[in-house]
Amino acid sequence: MIKYLKTAQLSAFEKTNGGIVYLLPDVIVKICTLIPLVFLWKVVMSSGAKVDMTTEQMLTYAVLSALLADMLVVKTPASGWLSEGVLLKLYGRPLPVLGQLIALTVGGWVPMLLLFSLPMVILSPLLDVNLVPASPYFLLSFLLCISLGFAVDFLFACLSIKLRNMTWLICRIRAAIVSFFSGTIIPINLLPYGLAEAVKYQPFASLGGAPLSIFVGAANVERTIALQILWNLILWPLALLAFRKSQEGIVSYGG
C-alpha cells in the first residue's frame, strides 16, 4: 500500500512541477464556467420548468458535479497508452499495472481538489448552494461510483488497444456517451419522453448521476446503490479479463 501511496504522491507533485501558478488558468476556467451555470439553472428553475427537483436541489447538483467532475467520471492515463507510451512505462515497474493506473489517477486529482473544489465548497453559501448531503449513504455511493468509473475506463482503454489508431475517436465518442448517460451534465430525472426511467438502469447511470442524486435527496437510495453494486460486480470481471487479453496487443512507436 505504501508503494501505491508514493505513486499517488508523485502523480500529485507532477501536476505542480511548473508551480501552482501553472494550474491557475485551469482553475479560473472552471470558476468562470461554474458561476454562469449556477445562474443559468436559477433562471431555468424560476421560469417554472417542471422537473422532479427543487431549485435548491438543482443548484447543489450542478455545483457538486463541477467540484467532483474528475471523480464522477474517471479517466486514467491509460487513454495515452499509444501516443504517450504510458502502459509500457508501467510494465517496467515492480507493481501491477492497473494498480499503478489507479494510484496515478487518484494522485492527479489532489491539486485541483485543493485549488478549486475546496475553496468553492467554502464559498458555496455565497451562491446560495447547500453542500450538506441529504443521506449518509452518499459516501458509499460515491466510492462505488469511483470504483465503477475505473472499470469503465479500463474497458474503453482495452477497446482503444484493440482498434489502435482510433484512440482519439474512441475518446471523443466515450466523452459524449458517458457525459450524457451518466447524468453529470443533465440530471437523468430531467430527461423527457420517459427516457429517465429507461436510462437509469444502464451502467453509466451508476457513475456520477447516482451519488449526485443521493446527495440532493432525489433518488431511491436502496435501488441506486443496489444497481451500483450490480454493475461493479458485472463490469470489473469483464474489465480484468479484457485487459489481460489486450496486453498482447499493446505496441509502441517503432514496434
Image (tube, grey):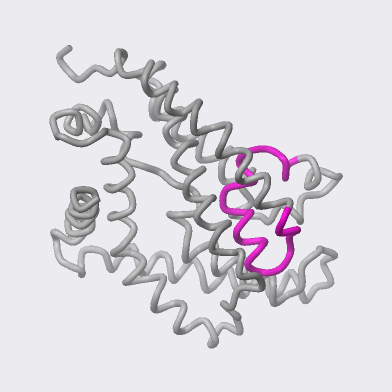
Q: For the view shown, which residue lies furthest in the bottom direction?
A: 126
> How many numbered badges does the structure rendering display?
0
> Splitting the image into 4 quarters, where does residue 233 fall?
top right
| Vertical comparison of 113 with 232: above or below | below
The residue drawn where x is 64% and y is 43% is 181
> Splitting the image into 4 quarters, where does residue 64 fall?
bottom right
Residue 212 covered by magenta stretch: yes
The residue drawn where x is 44% and y is 37% is 153
207 on left or right of 122: right
The residue drawn where x is 45% and y is 54% is 71
| Percent of width and height locating residue 134 | 66, 73
Q: Is the magenta stretch mostly helix, strand or loop?
A: helix
| Percent of width and height locating residue 48 | 84, 72
| Percent of width and height locating residue 78 | 33, 34
Q: Which span of residues is magenta-colored?
A: 199-222
| Percent of width and height locating residue 107 | 28, 55
Residue 101 covered by magenta stretch: no
> Splitting the image into 4 quarters, where does residue 211 fall?
bottom right
20 on left or right of 225: left
For this rendering, which residue is in front, 203 or 42?
A: 203
Q: Quadrant of the C terminus?
A: top left
Q: For the view shown, which residue lies furthest in the front direction?
A: 1
The residue drawn where x is 71% and y is 74% is 43
132 on left or right of 152: right
